[in-house]
Image (spheres, rainbow, N blue to C red):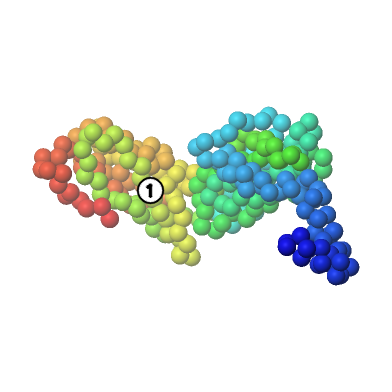
Amino acid sequence: MAFDFYLRWWRASSFSRVLFVVIGALVFFVPAPTRARSRVPLAIASAQAQVQDRPQAVNPGVRITSPLPGQRFAPGDTLTVNVQVDTSLNATDVLLGISGMDFTGTTRLDLVNYQARVAIPATFSGPATIGAVALDANSHEFPSAPITISVSPLVAPVQVAFVERYYYIDPSVESEQLSLTGTYADKIQRDLTTSDTGTIYSTNNPAVVRVGADGFAQVKGIGIAVITPVNGRARDFAIFVVEKAASPGGLVLFPRR
């Protein structure tokens, strides 16, 4: 029955026959580069993996030539990323992953050079890691070595505040990662945890708690310590009370904010 229906449909209209041929051509004769785009989401995942804690095997034939590692930018700047790909890889496209920002495609400048221009969000600050993944016509992926740049505001914040300010902990807790937020005159808030943003940490009692340049606090002994971050003229504090909990579950003298 189904065959008879399609046979009558085929004979009924020359337009139908033409439409059938056109659809068939689109299905069976799509050029390889267009079909390769179906795997672009996998390449995006590869580019994102390069900027996270699970980088893939690096291909030396794919290189980020600019910006330079450690180069400094400000929120709102336009970031120009240049990638060079060896001709032996037969690349047809390059995608970029940038931590804290959206992935982006690139423009091919010539046989080996690709470029992308990305606006750094006005709310972004701190380190940003960039990774590139080149693709060939068969969707093979060739990841670059990632690089890390620094994004730091040009002006100082009017206020800084720890996300959590009070810690009552047992000495078996070896460390805590502090998190600091800065508020600016234009009401924009930025993450100022890392030293890239101009934040400097100090402790009044390193025998109890030491603190690193990026707000990583290490418990060293029993007692009380105050951690102070300074960025410009703004400062805050975090109090650590380190002692063995005497009551069931421990007594929270300073509830977390």
Q: Position of residue 155 (x, y in %)?
A: 50, 56
**Circle 1 residues within 10 Å: few <14, some 14–19, many ≥20:** some
**Residue farthest along the right direction in this orientation:** 14
Q: Which amino acid lies under the numbered mark 1 shown in the image of this protein?
A: Ser
Give me the residue at 60% from left, 37% from top: 146
Q: Residue 78 or 186: which is nearer the viewer?
A: 78
Q: Is residue 14 left or right of residue 193?
A: right
Q: Residue 175 or 51: which is nearer the viewer?
A: 51
Please tell me how many numbered marks the rendered image carries. Answer: 1
> In the figure, residue 91 lies in which quadrant?
top right
> In the figure, residue 201 lies in which quadrant?
top left
Q: Quadrant of the N terminus?
A: bottom right
Give me the residue at 22% from left, 41% from top: 169
Res 246 seen here: yes
> In the figure, residue 42 lies in which quadrant?
top right
Above or below residue 180? Residue 12 is below
Give me the residue at 58% from left, 38% from top: 50
Q: Residue 108 or 142: which is nearer the viewer?
A: 142
Res 152 seen here: no
Q: Is residue 155 left or right of residue 78?
A: left
Q: Quadrant of the C terminus?
A: bottom left
Q: Position of residue 104 (x, y in %)?
A: 65, 51
Q: Position of residue 245 (x, y in %)?
A: 14, 40
Q: Is residue 207 left or right of residue 152?
A: left
Give me the residue at 65% from left, 35% from top: 144
The residue pinned by badge 1 equals: 179
Above or below residue 8? Residue 216 is above
User: Which secondary structure, mark 1?
Assistant: loop
Q: Position of residue 36 (x, y in %)?
A: 72, 45
Q: Is residue 185 left or right of residue 49?
A: left
Above or below residue 236? Residue 2 is below
